[in-house]
Amino acid sequence: MILLITCISAFAIALVLGRWVIPLLRALKAGQSIRQIGPSWHNTKQGTPTMGGVLFILASAFAVFADASAIRAGDYTILYVYFFALAFGVIGFADDFIKVCKKRNLGLTALQKSLMQLAVAAIYLYLLQRSGRLSFDLYIPFANVTVAVNRIVYLVFAMFVIVGCVNAVNLTDGVDGLATGVTMPVMLFFVLIATRWADAPVAKFAVALFGGLAAFLCYNFHPARVFMGDTGSLFLGGAVCGIAFALDMPLVLIPVGIVYICEAASDIIQVTYFKLTHGKRVFRMAPIHHHFEMGGWSEIKIFTVFTLVTVLGCALAWLGVMNRFCA
């Protein structure tokens, strides 16, 4: 019942905030700049308010501060996860702010973003390890076994996964509603897993973010009235990998994040092949959602198919980890 109330409250908060925040962003001329190399029909999106991710960022804060019983009891996990995701959201906000102020589709440099993201990841891993949340053993889904890993190797692996995951979610935010729709089943999966393992703090944050995203989708579904911007997509990336590490099961990101992985992989393959062959391409356009878009898929079809693929990935992940703590 508490989780249901949290979800509904976050939904209502984000929905109400949208009626105030979106006109404000429009009045501030916080419009999205469209990449010149993108699909030509995306030019009609020019000027659509961005940085709308603040809606579900604020709504999910409800889970953190509305019920502080876990915090009072000395369990700071929900704070660690939320502020970890928020730190990435702040990096995204800085990126969006530079784009909006300079009226160009460039923000922070890749090096600046990478260094800040690595620093945030290192601090988060330290806090999780210090609180006893994070072991240096790697849980293998489906096999239901845990493999001991060298501490340094694990930390390098973890930082690589975090930065990669966060940026993969960012790449997924390329057509109306896509990153929102894909992330909702991932959050629901984490709610179910955390509830099964009686991990109330993680479950509350995940269900609040689910509710906030559901409300945001009302504004972000095609044709989008607002975009989440890097503010929202980097926050979502932080939330996804932050929860996975808080549950000490980072490898579950492979099935639940299959769409994120495909988006990032398609971009890497396209750029690498283009450079090696001096101009040839594997995909019509990368990331892969643009490949299908250039092939005639509507934004709604892309949203639907990619979200369903994520639902299947989450169902598979559930089968892979549901027996982790069973005798």
Image: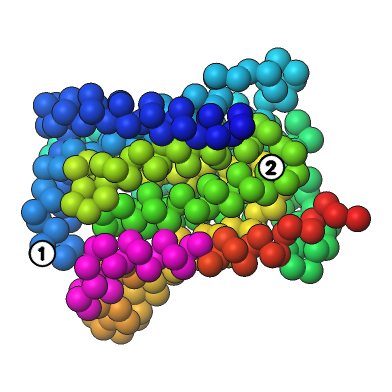
Q: Quadrant of residue 207?
A: top right
Which residue, given by chain and number where applicable, does mark 1 sit on?
40
Looking at the image, residue 133 lies above or below residue 299: above
Residue segment shown in magenta: 292-311
Q: Nearer the viewer, mark 1 or mark 2?
A: 2
Residue 70 image point, x, y percent: 70, 22
Residue 59 image point, x, y percent: 43, 29
User: Distance between the Cα atoms at labels 1 and 2?
Assistant: 45 Å
Residue at x 23%, y 35% (from the top left corner): 98
Q: For the N terminus, which image quadrant?
A: top right
Q: Nearer the viewer, residue 22 or 163?
A: 22
Which residue, given by chain and number where applicable, does mark 2 sit on?
195
Left/right placement of residue 30 relative to residue 143 reads: left
Residues at circles 1 and 2 in contact by the CB criterion of under 8 Å: no
Pick whichever of labels 1 and 2 is earlier in the sequence: 1
Toward the top, the furthest residue is 72
Looking at the rendered structure, the kind of residue marked 1 is: Ser
